[in-house]
Image (spheres, grey):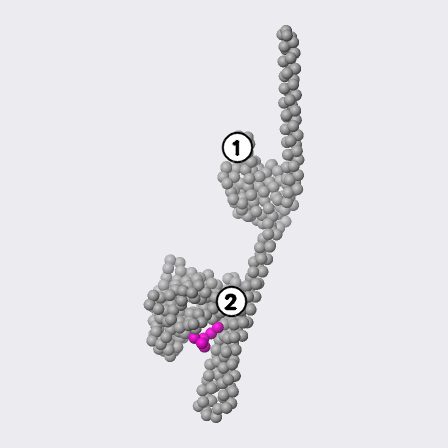
Amino acid sequence: MNDEQKSKQELIDELAQLRERNQVLETRLASLRINDTRFRALFNQSKDLVTIFDLDQYIKNINPRVEDLTGFKSEDVIGKHLRNFLTDVEGQDAAGKNKQVLAGKSIPIYERRIINPQGKESIVEVNLIPVKDENDQIYETISISRDIADRKLAEEQRIQLQVAQERNRILTQVVSHATHDLMTPLTSIKTKLYLLEKTTDEAERQNRLTQINIQITRLQDMIQDIITLNRLDNLRFQDFPTQAISLTPFVEATVEKYLPEFESKNITCAVNLPDDNISVAINVGYLNTALKKLLENAINFTPSQGQITVSLETGARTVHIHIQDSGIGISEDDLPRIFEHFYRAEKHRPADKGMGLGLTIAKSIVNLHRGNITVSPVEDGGSIFTISLPQS
């Protein structure tokens, strides 16, 4: 084969290689067109909001879902910086997260609000995805946001249903317990009225009337507890007025009202209150009720010749009211449930004392003060209840 023939053959081989390369390129190009068509179909038909940003956070593209939810048209946002459309604090935070992703940091999925130009608010779940080139360098990010308004609504409805079910459970419990507890004094009153009719001795008649009055008072207290608890269960923080007061004279005045009861049961009352002006914001009427419930509980469970100690202690930002008794104490089994509606340690419960709502009422009141109430056993016997309140 001469040189001319060789040259022709080489040319033919090169042309064949070119045709092969061209065919490969055409195949790749066709594949790219298919992928691009698929991407655009997904991009345009997606129910999620898809936004593409370049390295400088300028918007490269948005899909129709972004237009639908935000009210912005593609021609109004493409080529413009992200900050032009984020004016609120959450928006600035979103821009910061996008910048971190562009810098190579991983950002977990997060939620944010979107408010369109008409003022309509939506909640979306945002996932920021970095896009890398063949050199593994990030050159853009894709923000995929999912409208979770329906999910949020479903969650709210589920919570509302749970609240309704809990209230229904408590109502059923109230009816059950109230029926039993209210019938006891009513039966006693009915019996004493029957005996009163049969009694001719004046002293005995007066004794019967006194016992009837005691049972009537007991009924009134039970009904008032139910009313109070129902009112507390429906109160919210914003509907709970408070005023700043000095705590020492307030606690002192509440304790003084129970001095006759301490004396009648032969119980010593020790009051350790600081002279300092400890200022707290409270609802005077309701906190007074909480203290009364704790004092009555201590009196009920403290035997004759026992002692009840009331003291105040201040912390860095809180003040603690301690009510300690030397009574029968609370078992380990009862401690976790002591503040539940109607819960009573039956083996230690005085037969003629309350419905088991006193401690529940006290806890509800302290919670409305954004405080906390705890109980713990005392080593030498008895219990100590502590109300912790934020200082003014």
Viewer-nearest residue: 5 or 22:
5
Foreground mark, 2 or 1?
1
The residue identified by callout 2 is: 232
Which residue is at the front of the view, 144 or 201? 201
Report if residue 40 lies within the magenta region.
no
- Magenta stretch in the rendered image: 350-355
Give the answer, above or below, for where 84 lies relative to 188: above
Residue at figure coordinates x 56%, y 58% from the top left: 159
Q: Nearer the viewer, residue 284 or 209?
A: 209
Above or below residue 324? Residue 58 is above
Measuring 47% from the left and 68% from the top, which residue is drawn there? Answer: 343
Residue 116, above or below 25: below
Residues packed near mark 1 inside 10 Å, few (<14), some (14 to 19) or many (20 plus): few
Residue 13 shows in the view = yes
Kindly identify the residue that appears in the image at 54 percent across and 46 percent down. Answer: 110
Q: Amino acid at mark 1?
A: Gln
| Total tally of numbered discs in the picture | 2
Instruction: Name the residue at the front extreme.
Output: 1
CB within 8 Å, label 2 to label 1: no
Quarter of the image that includes the C terminus: bottom left
**x then y, percent, for residue 219:** 50, 77
Secondary structure of residue under mark 1? loop
Amino acid type at circle 2 is Leu
Instruction: Give x and y (percent) for residue 51.
Output: 60, 40
Residue at 64% from the left image edge and 12% from the top image edge: 9
Percent x, y of residue 330: 40, 68
Please, is residue 49 above or below residue 172 in the view?
above
Residue underneath mark 1? 137
Secondary structure beneath label 2: helix
The overriding secondary structure of the stretch rendered in magenta is loop
The residue sitting at the bottom extreme is 200
Dividing the picture into quadrants, the one containing residue 161 is bottom right
